[in-house]
Amino acid sequence: MSDPLLDIRNLTIEYPTPAGRFVAVDDVSFDIGAGERFGLVGESGSGKSTTILALMRMLRGGVVSKGQMLLNGRDLAQVPDASYRRLRFAEMSLVPQGAMSSLNPVLRIGRQINDIFEDHGVIHPPKDRVSIIEDLLQRVGLPAAVRHRFPHELSGGMKQRVCIAMSIALKPSVILADEPTSALDVMVQKQVLATLGRVQKELGAAVILIGHDMALMAHFVSKLGVMYRGKLVEMGPVKEVFANPQHDYTKMLINSLPTFERRTRAAAADRRSS
């Protein structure tokens, strides 16, 4: 068996508070290989997004107090800040939760995508730059003309696809998606996840999907981790977790999904009471 692409070992993240340290992520371990899809699910405040932000070195006030984060066998804690800036997008990229707040409102989409290349020293001749940006947009199902538009001229689903296009611009080996569909309606959620899955296959990249929607996880990921109060309380192949959940919180998440059976019982109860 090949070594994992991303290996998280005993990760602990703390925030200092006036009342003492607050442990947001408590001894979390998991790994993911190339081409795999891993889901982290849990309620707000469970530590899932904090884990992802630690990987990107974007924590605000938080401190990694224990553990290792290995990317292709390299300990990310030993990477200097200047080199980490180059690592983002090139080796590991983030699809953020709020596309509107992540995109610069006063810059056209094409300019924002081109900034990624320039920040990493990838300079294209003017005649090639346009075609490269247009190709990126078309790969995520957007018209090439979107490069001329400002973020406010796009729908929520289109903005999220722009963020996906930006995340794959430098062909990273790991894509971190932090609740990328949380503000979208059900049909657009499906389209965005289909787009993410398609570009992931093209790159052969690993994807970590963060969220709280078990139904979306069931359709997208192959391996699922359940976080509760900062701990990874359950992990396994997604089919096994759904078929035989071990932790009470996992059972509660699965039972919260609507089913025809529960609807029928509720309807029958309504008829009896009428």
Image (cartoon, grey):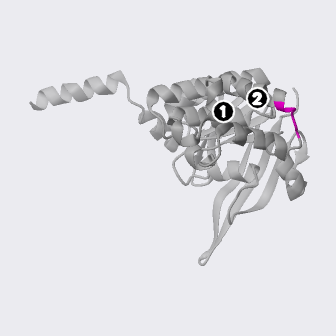
The residue at 82%/40% (across/down) is: 117
**Name of the residue lying farthest toward the bottom:** 18
Residue 221: image location, x then y, percent: 63, 28
Inspect the image, locate mark 1, and give the three-letter code of the amino acid beneath it.
Arg
What span is colored magenta in the figure? 122-126
How busy is the neighbourhood of tag 2: few (under 14 within 10 Å), some, or many (20 plus)? Answer: some
Q: Nearer the viewer, residue 210 or 106?
A: 106
Quadrant hosting residue 143: top right
Residue in front for this viewpoint, 40 or 120: 120
- Mark 2 highlights which residue? 130
**Residue 244 appears in the rendering:** no
> Splitting the image into 4 quarters, where does residue 176 fall?
top right
Q: For the C terminus, which image quadrant?
A: top left
* SS category of the residue bearing label 2: helix
Residue displayed at 52% across by 51% down: 44
The residue at 54%/24% (across/down) is 191
Q: Amino acid at mark 2?
A: Val
Q: Is residue 251 visible?
A: yes
Please report whichever mark, 2 or 1, sits nearer to the chain's N-terminal start: 2
- Give the dominant element type of the magenta stretch: helix, strand or loop: loop
Vertical placement of 214 versus 118: above or below?
A: above
Which secondary structure, mark 1?
helix
Q: Viewed as shown, does residue 40 lie left or right of 186?
A: right
> Spatial distance from mark 2 to mark 1, Cα to Cα?
9 Å
Circle number at residue 147: 1
